[in-house]
Image (cartoon, grey):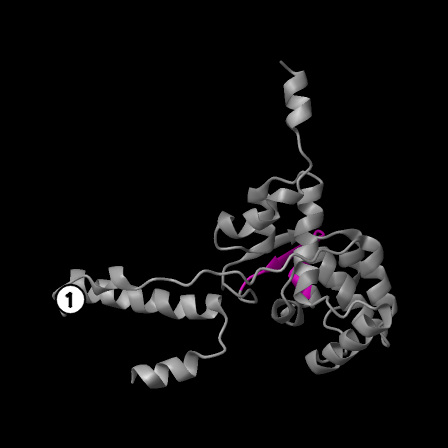
Amino acid sequence: MAHQAKREWRGLKPATINRRLQILKRITKLAFEKWGWLNEPVWRKIKLLPERNERHVYLTREEVDRLAAACRSPDAADLVIFAAYTGLRRGEMFNVRHTDVRNSVLYLNAQTKTGKPRHIPLHPRALEIAQRLPLGITPAVLQNQWTEAREACGMQHVHWHDLRHTFASWLVQQNTPLLIVKQLMGHATVKMTERYAHLAPTQAHQEILKL
């Protein structure tokens, strides 16, 4: 059984393996502390893997516009802009309807990855697109046009999810508090948001001048 599990887990990212290990730790902890099925705290021996799979690719507004302009269809171009100015995950984006927008705010309920509601005030560029959603393009067609646009711009290293990271980076660079960034991104914990903290303009010099 151990050999089979090792074979099934081969090639998985550390973050994916850790999520499975967390479930195993939770079950064995309950089995020891609550159910009495185990004679020792086995869960303490389960160690998580180090995760080094974070990407740090953030685009400028000009680069986002270049990628959008390189898309073959207006719908694909609009979704590139919409993703960068809302930080939505691709799955969330395709579930949005124009009826989810009220008073320039996008209300996400069951459409989120975590299942928790999220409210995002919309930038004018995103608002104009949101009022026309859903667009007449499928995820597969969008992916094909996105791949072509990256190649045309010489930006093959950019992933679609980097548009989400870009949204967070723009917020942090203009000194938006991390707790607000966390809420807008729909992060489960602020630790996930702290990956962007290094992008914030330093206030050290200004603070020293106050002495």
Q: Is residue 30 visible?
A: yes
Quarter of image, res 56: bottom right
Quarter of image, res 89: bottom right
- Name the side, left or right, on which 146 lies relative to 74: left
Please identify the quadrant where the N terminus is shown: bottom left
* Callout 1 secondary element: loop
Residue type at mark 1?
Trp
- In the rendered image of this protein, does residue 109 appear above or below residue 169? below
- Does the magenta segment cover residue 108? yes
Which residue position is annotated with label 1?
Answer: 35
Number of numbered labels in the structure image: 1
Which of the two residues, 18 or 74, is positioned nearer the viewer here?
Answer: 18
Q: Residue at x 84, y 60 (%)?
A: 65
- Residue that protrudes farthest toward the top in the picture: 211
Stretch in magenta: 99-109
Q: Residue 96's x, y, as percent?
A: 65, 67
Q: Residue at x 61, y 71 (%)?
A: 91
Please identify the quadrant where the C terminus is shown: top right
- Name the side, left or right, on which 169 lies relative to 29: right
Q: Is residue 102 visible?
A: no
Quarter of image, res 93: bottom right
Q: Residue 90's x, y, as percent?
A: 65, 69
Which of the two residues, 207 or 174, is positioned nearer the viewer here?
Answer: 207
Q: Residue 202's x, y, as percent?
A: 67, 33
Specify few, some or many for label 1: CA neighbours under 10 Å numbering under 14, 14-19, or 20 or more. few
Q: Residue at x 38, y 80 (%)?
A: 6
Q: Residue 13's x, y, as percent?
A: 50, 71
- Does the magenta segment cover residue 144? no
Which of the two residues, 147 or 3, is positioned nearer the viewer here?
Answer: 3
Q: Residue at x 73, y 67 (%)?
A: 157
